[in-house]
Amino acid sequence: MHHLPEIAIIEPNTLTALGLRTILEELIPEAVIRTFSSFEKLIDDTPDMYAHYFVSANVYFEHTSFFLERKPKCIVLSAGEPPLLTGIPSLNILLPQEQLVKTIMQTRKRGHELTHHPVTPPATDAEHELSAREIEVLRLVTKGLINKEIADKLHISLTTVISHRKNITEKLGIKSVSGLAIYAVMHGYVEADSI
């Protein structure tokens, strides 16, 4: 049986936890993401089975000994204040979604891999194969170009661009531009810095 990486979000603010969960589900579709409103709820679960912990700063400080043992797996959620901990990645949850996604991508890039085993794309990837033209369109979408600009740049009609975008969305099952950007970065179609 293939074991999916599990990620715990320990964050008392429900909206923050749900927002982060949505982003992580788009970023790492193969992971199982669980949210806990308190440290106690995490402990009631099986706290050691998680590949990563996204922990609210308050919870982290109240239970430092638990998280220090798991330091390589922790990312502390801060609300705009500068990171108080050296050597522990932190994530400013007040950033707009695109920035948040970028920060998570850069955290992954810096070797803070979100799983301890290499992520093997699901076998269904063959069905998702994008054509060379769809990849070109995807790249331009992630750079923020609108359909008309994409049509001009690729010398194709507006209808063709719309048709390509529809195919990309259907093949990948991703509707949001930020989701497509994440997919493009994860699959090496674009550099995280170029978005």
Image (cartoon, rainbow, N blue to C red):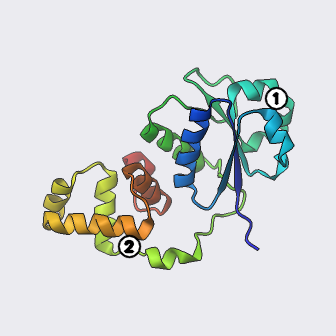
Residue sticking out furthest to the bottom: 126
Which numbered tag is attached to residue 64? 1
Q: Are marks 1 and 2 in contact (CB under 8 Å)?
A: no
Q: Residue at x 57, y 49 (%)?
A: 24
Q: Disc 2 marks which residue?
A: 130
Q: Position of residue 4 (x, y in %)?
A: 70, 63
Q: Quadrant of residue 154?
A: bottom left
Res 118 visible: yes
Residue 117: give x, y in percent of width and height: 71, 62
Instruction: Name the mark on residue 136.
Output: none
| Residue at position x 76%, y 33% in the image | 38
- Please tell me in which quadrant of the rendered image residue 56 appears: top right
Label 2 crowd (10 A; few <14 / some 14-19 / many >=20): some
In primary-sequence order, the first of circles 1 and 2 is 1
Relative side of 45 to 55, left or right: right
User: Which type of secondary structure does the marked residue at label 2 adopt?
Assistant: loop
Residue located at (33% from left, 70% from top): 167
**Quarter of the figure that contains the N terminus:** bottom right
Task: Kindly report the distance in space between the C-alpha atoms of the residues bearing marks 1 and 2.
Answer: 45 Å
Residue type pointed to by label 2: Leu
Amino acid residing under circle 1:
Thr
Q: Nearer the viewer, residue 33 or 75?
A: 33
Spot occupied by residue 149 in the image (x, y as percentages of width and height): 17, 54
Q: What is the quadrant of residue 62 in the picture?
A: top right
